[in-house]
Image: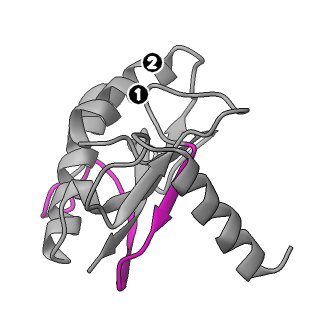
Amino acid sequence: MKIEHFSNIVGLLVLLSPGILPANSDIQFLNPEGIFKPATFSQIAITSGDTVVYISGQTARDEKSNIVATGDVRKQAEKVFQNLRVAVEAAGGTMGDIAKITTFVVDLKPDDRVWIGEMVKQHFPKPPAHTLVGISALAAPELLIEIEAVAVLD
């Protein structure tokens, strides 16, 4: 499918879906009919801003590179979200400007998606597109979770 056809289809979806997309937003989040409608993330993020910011995977390291909350993935996740906020704000944005996150969790268990989803809802005004990946290890053995992000700014 050519890019212009895809753009036309996305535009048509937007026009036919009143009330699904937030008004006056550079990121439009969509959960279209025909696919699963998650409560903790959006299936599609459509962006229209001028600046795309790629945020490296954030871990539970403080500003001196000390790993915090060793052995506690939930406490490490809180630090990760704090670091994401610092990163996006340093680029001139907010957590609401983040369109997509990818979360990597060491030894991910099926029930982990519940608390991770709740944290996402706490830290974002609208849940971004989100991929959750279970892995065997991160760069340091004490690290249990890492989140990378893409933000779109005007």
Residue at image coords 43%, 30%: 40
Indicate whether residue 14 is drawn in magenta: no
CB contact under 8 Å: marks 2 and 1: yes
Image quarter of residue 125: top left
- Quarter placement of the C terminus: bottom left
Alpha carbons under labels 2 and 1: distance apart: 5 Å
Kind of residue indicated by mark 1: Gly
**Nearest to the observer: residue 123 or residue 141:** 123
Identify the residue at horizontal 53%, vertical 36% (top origin).
106
In x, y percent, where is residue 96? 25, 54
Residue at image mark 2: 114
Above/below status of 117 relative to 147: above
Pointer 1 local density, CA inside 10 Å: few below 14, some 14–19, many at least 20: some
Residue 47 is situated, as x and y percent measured from the top left of the image, at 44, 68
Residue 3 relative to residue 65: left or right:
right
Which structural element holds mark 2?
helix
Front one among 117 and 106? 117
Is residue 44 among what the camera can see?
yes
Above or below 103: residue 96? below
> Looking at the image, which is closer to me, 46 or 82?
46
Magenta stretch in the rendered image: 43-65
- What residue would you read off at disc 1? 117
In screen coordinates, is 108 left or right of 40? Answer: right
- The three-letter code of the residue at mark 2 reads Val
